[in-house]
Image (tube, helix red, strand yellow):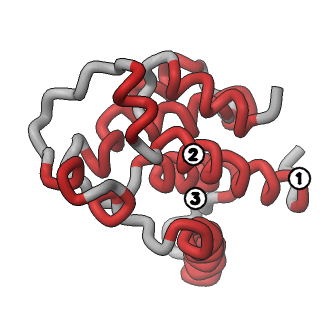
Amino acid sequence: MTRKERAIALFMQGANCAQAVCGAFADLMGMDFKAVCRMSAGFGGGFARQREVCGAVSGMCMVAGALYGYDDLADDTEKAAHYRLIRSLCDQFKAVYGSIVCRDLLDAKKAQDTAPDPDPRTEEYYSTRPCARQVGAAAEIMEKYIAEHPVF
């Protein structure tokens, strides 16, 4: 199973978009799956359904940070290199979907729903939202980058 397929499967099992992408890479990040799910829990729906940055994109960026991030907080060169990586990943997502903002990616009615209560995961939910495709795209972008830039 590819990371893309794993991310989509996690989303279809009830994970939010950020959890689905992060969860698909938990083993590579050297983190426990449950810890990854907890860490990424608040990013779903564009930061707790506020429809800000897409959770799938946030998940992709968290994976990139775990694998390629910097830890010398005073090293501006490393920071700039990492920011360039994140921008490149986001640009690849934008090239397909036109935005990395949740409300822009959803239809107008769904974009206005910012209540913190999640929608029931029904057949209609999955068939009327682009989220599974976007989860897959974010995971695929990250998977491709990892293949081209192995960390291990």
Local crowd size for mark 3, using a 10 Å CA cut-off: few (<14), some (14–19), many (≥20) = few
User: Spatial distance from mark 3 to mark 1, Cα to Cα?
Assistant: 23 Å
Residue 26 higher or lower than 54, as above or below = above
Amino acid at pointer 3: Asp
Local crowd size for mark 2, using a 10 Å CA cut-off: few (<14), some (14–19), many (≥20) = some
First of labels 2, 3 by sequence position: 3
> What residue lies at 52% left-to-right and 67% top-to-bottom?
97
Residue 152 higher or lower than 54, as above or below = above
For numbered disc 2, what is the local secondary structure? helix
For numbered disc 1, what is the local secondary structure? helix
User: Spatial distance from mark 1 to mark 2, Cα to Cα?
Assistant: 21 Å
Task: Look at the image and tell me whether residue 16 can be seen.
Answer: yes
> What residue lies at 74% left-to-right and 36% top-to-bottom?
3
Residue 105 higher or lower than 32, as above or below = below
Closer to the camera: disc 3 or disc 1? 1
Amino acid at pointer 2: Arg
> What residue lies at 41% left-to-right and 48% top-to-bottom?
55
* Location of the C terminus (image quadrant): top right
Q: x, y (%) of residue 92?
A: 64, 71
81, 115: nearer the viewer: 115
> What residue lies at 72% left-to-right and 50% top-to-bottom?
140
First of labels 1, 2 by sequence position: 2
Name which quarter of the figure residue 2 lies in.
Answer: top right
Q: Would residue 133 be found to the left or right of residue 52 on screen? A: right
First of labels 3, 1 by sequence position: 3
Q: Which residue is mark 3?
A: 71
